[in-house]
Amino acid sequence: MLTTEEKTRAVVAALEDIKANDIAVIDTSKLSSLFERMVIASAQSTRQTRALAGHVVEKLRERGETALGIEGEDSGEWVLVDLGDVVVHIMQPAVRAYYNLEELWSMKHLPRAAA
């Protein structure tokens, strides 16, 4: 079983593999008891949001982790991957700007290397 930090690094690496944009990692450990980290990334199309989500799930499965749930694949504008202590949001830029999760959840942005 991966630590939160290892899982976060694996998610970021999987997102970078297939060119996600504007990856942000937010430490939510002091804000919510439901999860420790939130990873947010942008994708340029519904096809890319779905591909990124699938790639994250596959790469984490290779490391022995299982996604607890995946939501939003039907529309593809915003796909959420629940990995327990890490939640991944893959959004198209207009949706990301509208919901502005970074501002909503940020108390502390972590640099990707420290995640």
Image (cartoon, grey):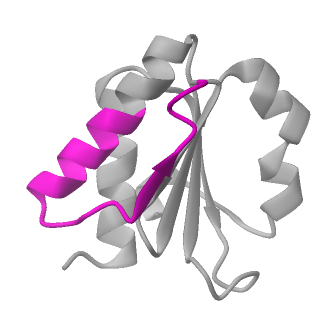
* Position of residue 99 measured from the top left corner of the image (x, y, whole percent): 86, 40
Q: Is residue 81 left or right of residue 6?
A: right
Name which quarter of the figure residue 16 lies in. top left
**Number of numbered discs:** 0
* Residue located at (72% from left, 21% from top): 93
Residue 17 to residue 62: above or below: above
* Residue located at (13% from left, 66% from top): 64
Which is more toward the observer, 32 or 74? 74
* Position of residue 32 measured from the top left corner of the image (x, y, whole percent): 71, 82
Q: Is residue 65 left or right of residue 111?
A: left
* Position of residue 51 measured from the top left corner of the image (x, y, whole percent): 36, 24
Name which quarter of the figure residue 1 lies in. bottom left
Specify whether residue 55 is painted magenta: yes
Specify whether residue 43 is painted magenta: no
* Residue located at (38% from left, 71% from top): 5
Residue 96 to residue 101: above or below: above
Residue 54 to residue 94: above or below: below
Which is more toward the observer, 107 or 55? 55
In this view, the residue farthest toward the front is 74
Residue 88 to residue 51: above or below: below
State the extent of the magenta-drawn residues as a range: 53-75
* Residue located at (54% from left, 15% from top): 46
* Position of residue 19 measured from the top left corner of the image (x, y, whole percent): 40, 20
